Image: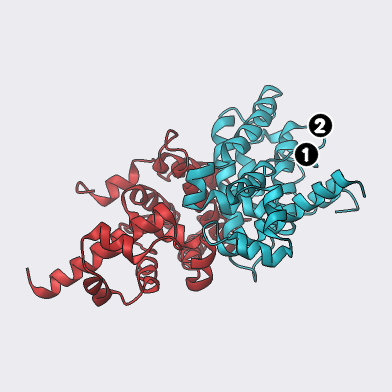
Chain colours: A red, B cyan
Amino acid sequence: MARQERAIRTRESILEAMAGLFIEVGYEAATIAALVERTGLTRGALYFHFPTKEAMARGVLDGAVTREGILPQTYKLQEWVDLGLLLAHRMPQEPMLRAAVQLSVDPKARSMFGTRWPDWINLGEDLLVEAEQRGELLPHAVPAEIARLAVGAWTGVQLVTEARPQGPGLDEEIARLYQLILPNVASVGVLAKLDTSPHRAKRLLGPAS
Amino acid sequence: MARQERAIRTRESILEAMAGLFIEVGYEAATIAALVERTGLTRGALYFHFPTKEAMARGVLDGAVTREGILPQTYKLQEWVDLGLLLAHRMPQEPMLRAAVQLSVDPKARSMFGTRWPDWINLGEDLLVEAEQRGELLPHAVPAEIARLAVGAWTGVQLVTEARPQGPGLDEEIARLYQLILPNVASVGVLAKLDTSPHRAKRLLGPAS
């Protein structure tokens, strides 16, 4: 393995370990000492990649807004739904994504780094505006409002679902959320064509997921 | 003022001050030292009312699930909507309610105290089951699922709205959330009779609110 590739992997593994700490104990209580213990790396090695805990938090947040897995669809509204279904499928498996939510709801981390919610809202709004231009939305549906409410609703459903491990999985709950919202967003002809199955994300990501 | 009444007021003012700290710096960083500074009370006086920080967190959470302001309505579905509209109206003004959300999304506090979400879900589900029995719901609407999704969606919309102080107020956003959801929940005749105005909560609480 080339030296550069190894450095990138080490960097990723540090971020993942720190993401785990952010999730388990919160931003304030996540210390470099705990990270040393968890990774087995020296302080020197950690500081080589990230000079401060703040830099690690920024690293986690930088990877949090992603269109990965989104494929072009006949309807733009399907791409908007896919955005949420894919994230619901990935989040339980990816500590980095969960840590980004955790940092957004932590008062201290939020005051230092802000949140990624405005980026998610913009991404959703762009897709909904395209959907509107193609006539896929009901006449009264306002893209900016729906994008904003959907990011809020998605985030809260994730938090409540995560807090009830004995309940339904996130992919099922998020699929139900879209099924609840879409009849008041999609034009009648388009609604019948949308796929909101909780299994869709897995299919989109391919057999390796 | 009688001694007992004074004690109750002091207790309330301690909880409110601690709620403010939970919101601003999070559970971990909220210290008794900061509370002494903020309230002007001695440690002895604080400990007389609450032996530990944990007891204060429990005090905040105990007051977090409330039917205050809910009045009997022709439609049970209206009472369910009122629950959410009232909380949206009160939360920006009441640090204790915001602190309860903050404690629910804090990993350490959540592991110690759990959340109030199951109680809110049960309260909503009870109203929705009554609404269903009276024929107010669409045939495919499942009370347990809607209650669960609504608590999640409500919570997330609150968090995203609070993080964007330049955006619309919580009462407006929550009213929009119900307007988005209800056409897929309420039977057609009932839907037209529901009041989802962002000003409704203020009217329900009366002129003093």
Disc 2 crowd, CA 10 A, few/some/many (<14, 14-19, 20+): few
Residue at the disc numbered 2? B74
Q: Earlier in the sequence, mark 1 or mark 2?
A: 2
Q: Residue at x 39, y 67 (%)?
A: A61
- Percent across and percent down for residue A139 are 61, 56
Q: Residue at x 57, y 36 (%)?
A: B118
| B28 on left or right of B179 | left
Among all residues in the image, which is located at the extreme top? B133
Q: Are marks 1 and 2 on the same chain?
A: yes
| B102 on left or right of B195 | left
Q: Residue at x 69, y 62 (%)?
A: B169
- The amino acid sitting under disc 1 is Lys
- Percent across and percent down for residue B193 are 77, 39
Whole-angstrom CA distance, mark 1 to mark 2, is 10 Å
Residue at the disc numbered 1? B193
**Chain for mark 2?**
B
**In the rendered image of this protein, does residue B90 appear above or below residue A1?**
above
- Percent across and percent down for residue B175 are 69, 51
- Percent across and percent down for residue A72 are 33, 59
Q: Is residue A60 visible?
A: yes
| A168 on left or right of B125 | left
